[in-house]
Amino acid sequence: MPELKAGSRPPWVGLASAVWITIASGNAYSFPLYSHALKSVLNLSQQQLTILGVANDFGENVGILPGIASNKYPPWVVLSIGVLASFFGYGVIWLAVSETIHNMPYWVLWIALVVATNSSAWLGTAVVVTNMRNFPISRGTVAGILKGYVGLSAAVFTEIYTMVLKGSSSSLLLFFTLGIPIICLALMYYVRPCTPASEPDPSDDAHFLFTQLASLVLAVFLLTTTILKDVMTISNALSYTFVAIMVVLLLAPLAIPIKMTLFPSSKKLNREASSSDNLTITDPLMPQSVSDTNLNDGEDMSEVDVLLAFGEGAIKLKKKRRPRRGEDFTFREAVVKADFWLLWFVYFLGVGSGVTVLNNLAQIGVSLGFNDTTTLLSLFSFCNFLGRLGGGVVSEYFVRLNTIPRTFLTTITQIIMVMTYLLYASALNGTLYIATALLGICYGVQFGVMIPTCSELFGLKNFGLILSFMGLGNPIGALLLSGMLAGYVYDTEEAKQGGSTCTGPDCFRLTFFVLAGVCCVSSLLSVVLTIRIRPVYQMLYAGGSFRLPQSTGH
């Protein structure tokens, strides 16, 4: 598929399409909506359910294969694999929950959940990598927008679950089985690579601001309708109206390419015309691709071309050097760097602790006397969105203002997470919603900061694979902290109480104390990383604007 010209409409059409695919890729965040059905239908213990939650996180975040594929194949191939994973994985889970197949083996269900949620990795990797490459000068903003919509996905699916599907878990799983593939197949053509702009477009800031405001309006709308559903009886007609408004708000980013079509920028037309009139060739006797190339930039040249160019004096033989931070790294070059592992452990400890609470959010609410946990999930989703969107926007502001590394924001939010876990452990009246809101914001910031930081330190050439490896911190954290810690503590307390459901603050209190300690360690590591990478940001953002580093020719 040919690349499209920078500054034209297709990158923005691709971003608008990516919003819908990004929402679809957040299907793993809806595990709490049907986890109770899995537990009751299959008669599972809390620890067995927690291990299924680990499968949910494992599938969502193990993106090594999608990362490799995104570097070798066009986005539609990566998206197609995600479509198949969603169809077959959620199809099997639907057969179990709807009791179409009785007594499905636990291991089959575990594998099906891994396959189903692995669709998130394929869909998410395709849209994030493609759009980060299409908008390299605005990496933090683009990452914040896309990850913000991922954070909203749970609220979107909760809206569908409560307003349209009337709280039916089997219907929700059937929607995932059929609806996600239909959406992605309809839009995958528009998610395509474009030649990135070499300098900022003045209109980009307004376009990004519009997209951010549209997502914020959607988030407020979803939270408001969820609260209304809990405090009053809503008719079917009003429920469908709410869903229709939600769809319109999801279509809002499409207004940008429509506006660019109806009202093209005269400055952009003049710039394109002048650039086409100013094409120069340095040597009329030699092709430009040879005369303008250095040997260490000759990855796409054959050995014969390189030797001919060297003999003609067009290029000089240079000793290949290792990339510096901020340039394009291969995966092997990245994994031997201390900054790589510092970033990985900061993400692993921060997100791993947050996902432990998310996976057990329904049980936490029930143990404290909140039987309807959909509002709790919607609150977390809304604040998670704010954190993801704000993580990209706020870190971008401080990076351009004072070249402060984005990980400084990570440090601040992880200190707040320590206090949040202690607030959970206290189980004071009225603190559950406050703690959930704070955790949602801080949890979202981890994503909004890690993604652009990863691209700025190690480049965009192998970004898909490096980002996917970073994402392994999520399922490993879920396995250690959620599966082995939270599930064990809950079941132990449940056995002490002698009932079928654990109640009271002791069900998760020890877990929260451990999570607070984990975030203390993570915040210290984040401080070390921030100090180490400050020179990189002083180089990349000197003068307040992003400067693309020179390629090292890998």
Image: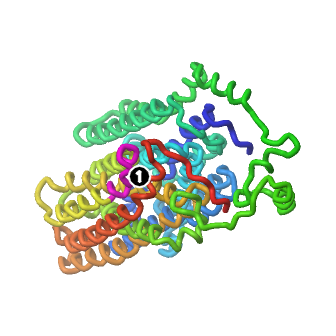
Q: Where in the figure is residue 80, as x and y percent of width and height?
A: 65, 53
Question: Which is more toward the observer, 487 or 205?
Answer: 205
Question: Magenta segment, principal secondary structure?
Answer: helix
Please state if 254 lies on the left or on the right of 84 as rendered.
left
Residue 1 lies, with reference to residue 442, above or below; the image says above
Q: Which residues are magenta?
A: 397-410
Q: Where in the figure is residue 395, as x and y percent of width and height?
A: 37, 48
Q: Where in the figure is residue 96, as x and y percent of width and height?
A: 49, 64
**Quarter of the view holding residue 519:** bottom left
The mark tally for this picture is 1
Which residue: 43% across, 31% down? 210
Q: Is residue 107 magenta?
A: no
Question: Which is more toward the observer, 261 or 334?
Answer: 334
Disc 1, SS: helix
Amino acid bearing label 1: Gly
Which residue: 38% across, 74% down? 48
**Quarter of the view holding residue 407:** bottom left
The residue that mark 1 highlights is 448
Q: How is the image coloured?
A: rainbow
Which residue: 41% across, 61% down? 533
User: Where does the C terminus fall, quadrant-wise?
Assistant: bottom right
Question: Which is more toward the observer, 369 or 468?
Answer: 468
User: Where does the N terminus fall, quadrant-wise?
Assistant: top right
**Quarter of the view holding residue 206:** top left
Q: Is residue 406 magenta?
A: yes
Q: Where in the figure is residue 536, as x and y percent of width and height?
A: 45, 57
Q: Of all residues shown, which one is farthest toward the front?
A: 313
- Residue 95 in sight from this viewpoint: no
- Residue 155 in sight from this viewpoint: yes
Please state if 345 lies on the left or on the right of 331 as rendered.
left
